[in-house]
Amino acid sequence: MIIREITDSIEKFAPLRLQEEWDNAGIQVGNPDAEITGILLCTDATEAVVAEAIERGFNLVISHHPLIFRGLKKIMGRTPVERAVAMAIKHDITIYSAHTNMDSAWQGVSFRMAEKIGMTNLTFLDGNLVEPYGDVDCATAGCGVIGDIEPAPAREVLKRVKEAFEVGAVRYSGDGNRMVSRVALCGGAGGFLLDKAVEAGAQLYVTADMRYHDFLDNNQRIVVADIGHYESEHFTKEIFLEIIQKKSPTFAVAFAKNETNQVNYL
């Protein structure tokens, strides 16, 4: 099987046209027509992950976050990105990323978050209709998710979130005793959807990369929780795995062992 067959399957689920203008999803490095020897799945394609792919004899790395966000004018090994790119090229490793297109896809990142804490009746927090493309059944796309949860105090729901997402520390504001039955979620930096969450009737909004004033200005309207960027998105690997196994159930595919959260907690 060639690499393009796998990336085409991912793009059928999450078409590249759904990515934000500033994003760089798709092939980062390598040859889409190469025969696959194995697939390594990760959130971030770091030097350690590329080295692991080489060690295991895998020539395809699939990440959520793109390795290359900004243009590279030189590759001299001065930065982690330059070193990872050079290593991948030297060892014929292809790196592919599905980022904001996976965030925006039906059953994408935020839907997987909701599944982890038992939410039901899910829909996009900010959805829109898009034109179908080819045989891709993706007429609806959007950002974030909102749905129902078994009623409980916000603090109890956040304890469940902390455990489910393996969070070192949850930052939150608002009344921890407030009863929560409707929750909004957004993987990654989701501050831009905070007003949408309030308007949609959520009592709790879970996301990452919130600013101090997001907490301060909204703690009377809604409980706001920041669980960390990596923590909110690291289960994206499961979506990749399911797409690949549906395409080829017996193919050599694994989660990267050398991947770690780049943010630590004391």
Image (cartoon, grey):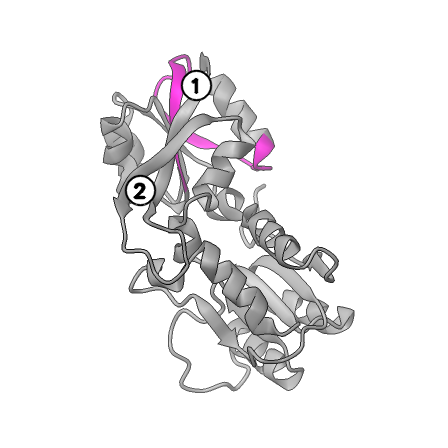
User: In the rendered image, which quarter is residue 256 located in?
Assistant: bottom right
Up-down: is 199 above or below 134? Answer: above
**Badge 1: residue crowd in 10 Å (few <14, some 14–19, many ≥20):** many
Asked if residue 44 is among those painted magenta in the image, a careful observer would answer no
User: Neighbour class for label 2 at 10 Å: few (<14), some, many (≥20)?
Assistant: some
User: Magenta region: which residues?
Assistant: 164-186
Q: In the image, which disc is placed on residue 191?
A: 2
Q: Secondary structure at mark 1?
A: helix
User: Which residue is nearer to you in this view: 251 or 39?
Assistant: 251
Q: Quadrant of the C terminus?
A: top right
Residue 215 falls left or right of residue 151: left
Q: Label 1: which residue?
A: 154
Residue 107 falls left or right of residue 127? right
**At numbered mark 2, what does the secondary structure look like: helix, strand or loop?**
helix
Whether 181 is among the magenta residues is yes
Residue 213 position in % (x across, y down)? 26, 37
Q: Amino acid at mark 2?
A: Gly
x, y percent for residue 133: 34, 61
Q: Residue at x 31, y 59 (%)?
A: 20
